[in-house]
Amino acid sequence: MVNYRGINHLALVTGDMTATIRFWRDLLGMRLVAGLGRAGYRQYFFEISPQTLLLFFEWPDAQPMVEKDHGVPVKGPAAFDHVAVAVASDEDLWALKDRLEAAGVWVSELVDHGFIHSIYSFDPNNIPIEFSALVAGVDLGRNPRMKDRNPLPAATEGPDPRVGHWPEPCRPTPMSERTLYPGEGTILTRDEPTPEPQDGVVKGSGIEMEAMNIVLKPIGHVQSDTPDDAIPRHWSISDVEGTLDILPEFQNGLKDIRPGQKIVVLFHFDRSPAFTDDLLTQTPYHRKQVKGVFSICSPRRPNPIGLSILEVVAAEDRKIRVRGVDMYNGTPILDIKPHVLDPEC
């Protein structure tokens, strides 16, 4: 069976991240431990406990929920009722109640549910919140209770999982096929300076261009058995073979790729350091003169995008075997194009 460890994070939505920070961090005392963002989007994480986080997406057009009391039935589409946060004891409940009331935020009286004591409130997004403390001596995990007056047949089978209702995996994924794709949060593990805020306009040559953030979704990644330190610096001098492992949702786009043809692969230099102005000119290690970044193939670029022309060795399902690899293992692939002189493609 799967070894569950609790809820890692609960993802909610706000249209006002500042008010959300003020409430969850400054009023309730939950540390703001991570943040991601770009134009029109933010994703911030608040720490409930060392292994449990509360995540908020900020979407500019999002509006607060229609206020609904905790546990009150609704009609129509519904999937969420309230967030219940565990605290250590009743003393914490009283401390929270005092803080909320001092801030002018509505909070209920303490309620005894038998196995927990709780208070109820709402955050600035009208998200219903419950804070709960366990009652000593009551452990539903060790002593499950089913007190439904008319329990469903499935519920009468007991608390433990029952086999036979779902098919078992017939082929566990072998280690050789277990791929970990990079996600947006990988930036949190890299020591890079936080980009300076943009003023919204880039000026130059008499033309004003609105600053923008462009989001690219990888279509797959590079698989290579060659150590990174043995990868050639450029596809034109490389005879290294590797595999382009494409995500299932893009498989149909590989329909006409055939062995023997050459393809143009655009990829992300995901391990390059953050670009700074001093990198506008660089001295390539195989040259002795200073060059402008747009005249060299350096991976340290304003937009870390690479391009390689590779020979297709084999193509099967979602995997393209290629020769000429000059990317590290795990490099995200952004796009694939045919390498042709005929513009009819």
Image (spheres, rainbow, N blue to C red):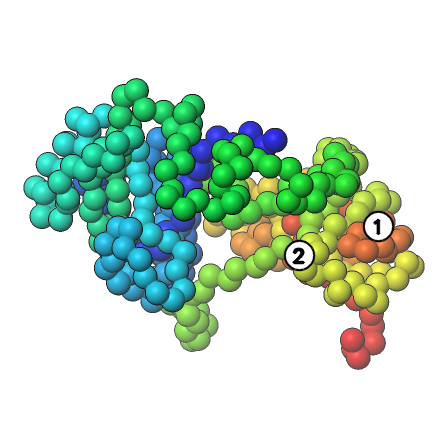
Q: Can see residue 58?
A: yes
SS under mark 2: loop
Q: Amino acid at mark 2?
A: Ile
Q: Which mark is residue 172?
A: none
Relative horizontal placement of residue 32, taking residue 110 as reference (left or right): right
SS under mark 1: strand
Q: Nearer the viewer, residue 121 or 343?
A: 121
Residue at image coords 48%, 30%: 5
Determine crowd level at label 2: few under 14, some 14-19, many 20+ residues with C-alpha closer than 10 A.
Answer: many
Relative horizontal placement of residue 12, taking residue 219 as reference (left or right): left
Residue at image coords 54%, 54%: 302
Indicate the position of residue 11 as horizontal and vertical percent values: 40, 48
Indicate the position of residue 66 as horizontal and vertical percent values: 26, 63
* Residue found farthest to the bottom: 344
Mark 2 and mark 1: Cα distance apart in space: 16 Å
Q: The C terminus lies in which quarter of the figure?
A: bottom right
Q: Amino acid at mark 1?
A: Arg
Residue at image coords 26%, 42%: 130
Q: Quadrant of residue 54?
A: top left
In this figure, which residue is indicated by the disc labeled 2?
Answer: 219
Residue at image coords 37%, 38%: 147
Q: The N terminus lies in which quarter of the figure?
A: top right
Of labels 2 and 1, earlier in sequence is 2
Above or below residue 298? Residue 146 is above
Q: Quadrant of residue 25?
A: top left
Q: Nearer the viewer, residue 318 or 211?
A: 318
Relative horizontal placement of residue 112, taking residue 138 as reference (left or right): left
Relative horizontal placement of residue 72, taking residue 186 as reference (left or right): left
Q: Quadrant of residue 10?
A: top left
